[in-house]
Image: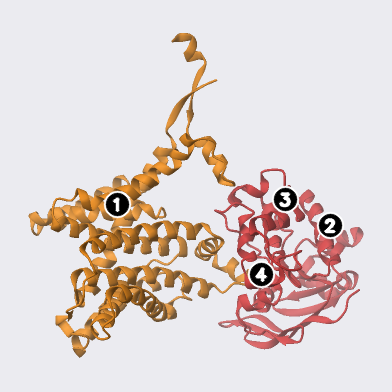
Chain colours: A red, B orange
Amino acid sequence: MTGQPILQVEEVTKTFGGIIALNRVSFEVREGEILGIIGPNGSGKTTVVNCITGFVKASSGRIRFRGREITGKAPHKIAALGVTRTFQIMRPYYSLPAYKNLVIPLFSPRARRTGGWRGGGRLGDRNTLGIDILEEIGFERDSYVPYKVTATLPTGYLKRLELARCLALKPELIICDEVFSGLSMSEIASMVPLIERLQMEGITLIMIEHRLRELFQVASRVMVLNFGEKLVEGSAAEVMADPRVREAYFGSEEVEEVMVHA
Amino acid sequence: MNAETGQRRRERIDRGIKVRTAGLYALMSWRELSYLILPRLVLIAGLLGLPMMMPGMYWKRVISIVCIYALLALVFDFLAHFVGLVSLGGAFFVGTGGYISALLNVKLGLPPLACVPAATLLGGALCTLLLLPCLPLRGVYFAIVTLMYPLLLARVIEALNILGGTDGIMGIDSLPSAWMEQYLVIVLVLAALFGLRRLVNTDLGLVLRAVKDNDQAVRASAMNVTYYKALGVFIGACIGCLSGACLVHIYMWAGISTFALDFSVLPIAATVIGGSGTLVGPVLGCLILVPVSELLRDFGTLRIVFYSLILLGFTVFRSEGLMVFGQRKYHQFERWKSI
């Protein structure tokens, strides 16, 4: 089911002063797949996301989306191509009601052109459309939840709101920066089918995660970063079997445990 | 009386109205409608009636100046609270709009009623263009640059002796009639006030507010933050230049003093007194501050002392501002309701 490469990252290096955050990292994402990126804290996972989405400029290397060079472009231009992201530290508009959060992405030129997530054509009333998207992503329409002030919502809803903001742009690629972190087991359990559904709808995903068990349920391939360098790439089983990964990242007991459950 | 008190309870008037006006407009009675409309009517009628209550020409002129400052205060509140740019650019806007309108009138011979709108748009565009370099930055840069421009432009005019130099541009036509001169600025204040209030509640206004609160998320939503900041500045600069254009046609003179920092500072003080983020508050603040400042002229140099004390008092004892306080109290009105 995976097809053409949709995103190609070639030899991307990012340095912050003397610190090398990413060192010649190359990988590609194929259309329709879910690529997991894991690695210890500080291994450069979020920097990869920031480089792809233009929030920081790569020091060298090339990033191409659908064959088109996007290296160093402004974030809003990259997002306008359909490369969207969530933030690890969630960035909703806290003072607004939840559904109003979606009016803002729906106002963007891309959403006007595409009509939002489901829209084939013209954009209707943005408030209604926002509530529609929220309902599909797990906000109960007939409750008060979509109308509540965002600051009062629990983390689970905020994580969904991050995803909803991406969906409002009718994305082709969503880069999820730790959407499972900070969620309870039951919240994660309800998030996994949502991720699977997005994949079924033809959206390609990159997922940066620390929750390995849930990630391995959905990811087609996994890439491991360590100290800004790519360690290995492959299926979940291949990656876990690699001794370098064990050494660099997990500590042997946890690997055993994950292997038993996988 | 006793049996009846058991059957009654107190209820806040706004509760039901608020719920019903939040989404769709379904007010049930004239009484409810009047609860919402009355404050607005008082403001409109009050502003329009103000010149008639003034004793002489001097105080009528003061009302015009109040309106000029009110426009600038609206701009400050709009930019600071809804676009997230703290602007000290009142003087910059007034000066630019004023000089453009004066030049169009004196050099090209356009009538004032054509000069004012032209100066509004040209000045708005020019100011936005000059402020563009600091828009991608966050923090105090915008404030610094807006403060710098009027100082710079005034010195340039003085040093190069262009645009009339220190004498200014004289012989500017006044507006067609005294009646129009009085009411044009009042109507403009009302239009700017209600226009901005409507704007900030549209989807575009929501985006502007989002730029203020959370620009990273707006970027991630495929929108150009700088463009929306520039749009906000353009709207603000247009209104500011409009006030400047009106000012020079009222005074029939444009000079370096249109770049005076009063135009930057007083609107901020008025916003603090009136309540920031309400838009109507700054107008109210100007209605208080400008006449007070005129009354205090009798005290000579002590004027600034009293003025400062008033500001100090407001900042310490009513830092939220009159309008925020007033709105809260208004919403707490109660009525008896039979059960």
> Quick one: SS at disc 2?
helix
Q: Identify the image quadrant of residue B239.
A: bottom left
- For label 1, the residue is B47
Against B246, is B57 above or below? above
Q: Amino acid at mark 2?
A: Pro
Q: Amino acid at mark 1?
A: Leu
Q: Chain of mark 3?
A: A
The mark that comes first in sequence, 2 or 4, is: 4
**For the residues tagged 3 and 2, is the chain the same?**
yes
In three-dimensional space, the C-alpha distance between marks 3 and 1, rounded to whole angstroms, equals 47 Å
Q: Chain of mark 2?
A: A
**Residue B91 in the image, given as x and y percentages of width and height:** 28, 71
- For label 3, the residue is A139
B10 horizontally vs A245: left or right: left
In three-dimensional space, the C-alpha distance between marks 2 and 4, rounded to whole angstroms, equals 28 Å
A6 horizontally vs B287: left or right: right
**For the residues tagged 2 and 4, is the chain the same?**
yes
The mark lying in front, picked from 2 and 4, is 4
In three-dimensional space, the C-alpha distance between marks 4 and 3, rounded to whole angstroms, equals 23 Å
**For the residues tagged 3 and 1, is the chain the same?**
no
Q: Chain of mark 1?
A: B
